[in-house]
Image (cartoon, grey):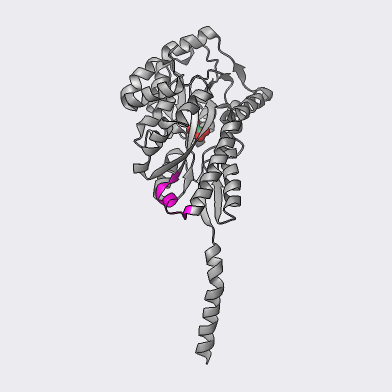
Amino acid sequence: MRRSVLIAATAAAATLALPTLAQTPIVIKFSHVVAPDTPKGKGAQRFKELAEQRTGGKVKIELYPNSQLYKDKEELEALQLGSVQMLAPSLAKFGPLGVKEFEVFDLPFIFKDTDAFRAVTDGAVGADLFKKLEPKGIKGLAYWDNGFHIMSANKPLHNVADFKGMKMRIQSSKVLDAQMRALGAIPQVMAFSELYQALQSGVVDGTEGVASNFYTQRIFEVQKHITLSNHGHLAYAVIVNKKFWDGLPADIRTQLEGAMKDASTYANAIASTENAAALQGIKASGKSTIYMPTAAELAEWKKALMPVHKEMESRVGKATVEAVYKAAGFSAK
Ligand code: LMR
């Protein structure tokens, strides 16, 4: 008797438990290195809202900004291992993974404006580059723009000679390494999360970056001079663990793809205004001088930096460089 009561109770509990189990949401951990209040942070937040709404709560997006889970390099390893499902690293971060073609995006002055960048990522070149990630267990979902790089240091950086011997932080890209050397600086690879302290303590003298990151990481507190050189471009790839993504129920995957498409439109639309607002914030702080280089100074930077294209051609791949030139309407002038 007691045994049958127990069996009945267990069966009832199992029946009760079943619907609960079926409703357990699929969790997507989305990790990134920047602050929530940046174009990438806001794009991630928008994706979370759209994805959770459109899947009717069947998917839960957990956001981990500010390198709170992983630093730059560890992030990609964690994605490959499946410890995290979604990331949005800068395109520079794929070189160390062995997909060197992505370093084409780091070539100095390669994009004359955002439209030139979008012409590359929205077309066949962007799609072909994403295919190169698949053997690494990674699927590319979208490209997110974050505008042009500016330079900072505790001394004015107007002429190329000003870079001589300066220790400049870079992301781990051989093209960025060559770029800093071409200016006469000493490049130092460092994780984004370590940058503020490294600048504060003098481990490095300066850095390149975008205004939204300079503002939200408070780089302007430890760098007295910023030059609006726009010499390079910063963009991200929103990527997922391929096995995880391919294993999702097809209807859910379609809903998530739709959410990503709309979140990407949003993230790309806000990048330039967010960076302009961040620059205003830096100006208002009164802590950094913001310098607009003259045409002659920029011509001098270009003269020093353009040879990096040829120098890096064999690493990045001639075909990739030429395909990007063509899609972007690149001109060396
Ligand atoms: C960096 O390391 O400087 C960038 O990748 C940071 C970012 O915006 O993701």
In the image shown, does 36 or 47 lie closer to the viewer?
47
Give percent across and percent down for residue 151.
52, 21
Q: Residue furthest bottom?
A: 1
Query: How far across and down, in percent of the image, does residue 25 sit?
Result: 54, 58
Give residue 148's position: percent from left, percent from top.
53, 24
Which residue is at 38% across, 38% downward? 131
Inspect this view and state whether residue 172 appears.
no
**Residue in view at x 30 percent, y 24 percent:** 314
Q: Is residue 207 left or right of residue 128?
A: right
Is residue 297 visible to the viewer in this orientation of the structure?
yes
Q: Is residue 241 magenta?
A: yes
The front one of 84 and 152 is 84
294 lies above or below 251 = above
139 magenta-colored: no
* Residue range of the region highlighted in magenta in the rendering: 240-250
Could you tell me which quadrant the C terminus lies in?
A: top left
Question: Residue 135's x, y, as percent?
Answer: 34, 42
Q: Residue 305: name its quadrant.
A: top left
